Image (spheres, rainbow, N blue to C red):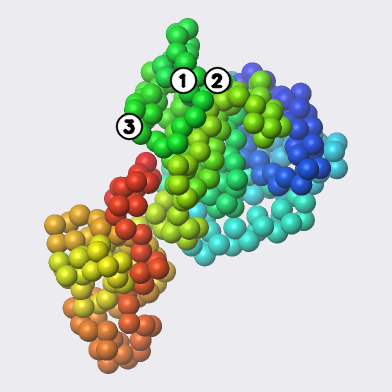
């Protein structure tokens, strides 16, 4: 979208985007840009024509390129008097609830000040363990984090097709209301050269956005303008949910948070959680796996080992080891203090039926 050739930033494309954004800002739209091209720009600056494989080299090139990308946006948007602010993220900023909340507040203040946030993954310090890995999923995290009304994914094809458009056949799918196995099948698997238009990560992003009750559209960045999309022109593939999504906190628990451990519960607790939307009490806990802190997200498993819920724990793993199997009134005498009668309050529990619908399995984001 913003590159010309593999290693050069496209000043004309940025100028067109800036003009579009300027028009929208005059209409009081709030805009956040999630961008790529830092490593590519760094390669161009250092006259490197083959992408390195070593993490330190990629980090160094990202450090060089991030400055170039930000300067390009500053120049393009500055022509219209629009200030920008850089936001660099890693997946840990999404997983950690405190950092996630701080990030929401930072975005809110930037937008209140009339600033255009320019978001990129922090490749200069990122390793495989802390990387989102692609801007499609990164932008979906950001869209959910700020409760965006619409996520626009610019790509080099017109949208999602029912087969590979590069073969000269296929019809554009104009509307998707849920991510079905048939939709997923159009995208191939990870690293699949037969994937339609590089759509796999875009469908992952759409699944996350739809689960939060938001909308997303995939359009050709060389053809479509944001103003056309907001006007309702028939462009691209629109992903629009059939029903209201999760609350922001429940969505974070289900889709964004890292699962730090497992609480195994007895049959009675499993039934109470599943049928009565009950809180998890220490009496119902039969086992524990992992080391975790207060405020971490843990999985809740029934006696068969099936995940029945996921929630935020009010006690850490060492405390739970001491109080599990005991009545809530015994907590203070066992620990010498009490943080409350529940280990996980029902308001902080997301049930398995929701996890299944949203594509959450064993702590991995699908």
Where does the image place residue 91, in percent across and percent down from the top left?
A: 48, 50
Q: In the image shown, does 49 or 259 lie closer to the viewer? A: 259
Q: Which mark is residue 161?
A: 1
Q: CA distance from mark 1 to mark 2?
A: 9 Å
Q: Which residue is mark 2?
A: 157
Going 79% across and 46% down the picture, which residue do you hit? 83
Which mark is in front, 1 or 2?
Answer: 1
Q: Which residue is mark 3?
A: 181
Q: CA distance from mark 3 to mark 2?
A: 22 Å
Inspect this view and state whether residue 224 appears: yes
Say whether marks 1 and 2 touch (CB < 8 Å).
yes
Which mark is in front, 3 or 2?
Answer: 3
Where does the image place residue 262, in percent across and percent down from the top left?
A: 26, 62
The reply, left or right, for residue 277 in relation to residue 18 is: left
Crowding around mark 1 (Cα neighbors within 10 Å: few <14, some 14 to 19, many 20+) is many
Give the position of the N terminus as an image quadrant.
top right
Q: Is residue 14 above or below residue 352?
A: above
Give the position of the C terminus as an image quadrant.
top left
The reply, left or right, for residue 345 in relation to residue 285 is: right
Where does the image place residue 26, in percent across and percent down from the top left?
A: 81, 42
């Amino acid at each position: 979208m913003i590159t010309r050739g593999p290693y050069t930033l496209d000043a004309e494309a940025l100028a067109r985007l800036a003009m579009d954004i300027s028009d929208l800002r005059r209409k009081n739209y709030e805009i956040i840009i999630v961008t790529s091209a830092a490593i590519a720009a760094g390669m161009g600056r250092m006259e490197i024509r083959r992408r390195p494989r070593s993490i330190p080299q990629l980090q160094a090139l990202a450090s060089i390129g991030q400055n170039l990308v930000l300067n390009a946006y500053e120049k393009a948007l500055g022509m219209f008097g629009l200030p920008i602010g850089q936001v660099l993220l890693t997946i840990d900023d999404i997983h950690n609830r405190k950092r996630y909340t701080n990030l929401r507040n930072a975005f809110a203040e930037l937008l209140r000040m009339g600033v255009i946030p320019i978001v990129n993954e922090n490749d200069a310090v990122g390793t495989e363990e802390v990387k989102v890995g692609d801007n499609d999923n990164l932008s979906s995290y950001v869209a959910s984090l700020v409760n965006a009304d619409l996520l626009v994914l610019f790509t080099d094809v017109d949208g999602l097709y029912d087969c590979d458009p590069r073969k000269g056949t296929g019809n554009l799918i104009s509307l998707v209301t849920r991510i079905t196995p048939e939709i997923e099948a159009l995208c191939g698997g990870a690293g699949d050269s037969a994937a339609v238009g590089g759509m796999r990560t875009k469908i992952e992003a759409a699944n996350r956005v739809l689960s939060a009750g938001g909308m997303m559209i995939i359009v050709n960045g060389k053809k479509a303008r944001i103003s056309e999309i907001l006007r309702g022109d028939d462009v691209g593939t629109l992903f629009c949910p059939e029903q209201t999504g999760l609350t922001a906190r429940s969505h974070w628990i289900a889709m964004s948070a890292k699962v730090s451990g497992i609480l195994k519960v007895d049959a009675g607790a499993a039934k109470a959680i599943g049928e009565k939307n009950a809180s998890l009490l220490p009496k119902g806990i039969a086992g524990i796996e992992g080391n975790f802190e207060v405020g971490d997200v843990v999985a809740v498993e029934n006696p068969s080992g099936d995940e029945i819920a996921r929630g935020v724990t009010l006690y850490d793993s060492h405390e739970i080891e001491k109080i599990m199997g005991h009545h809530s009134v015994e907590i203070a005498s066992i620990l010498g203090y009490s943080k409350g009668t529940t280990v996980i309050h029902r308001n902080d529990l997301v049930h398995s039926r929701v996890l299944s619908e949203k594509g959450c399995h064993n702590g991995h984001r699908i």
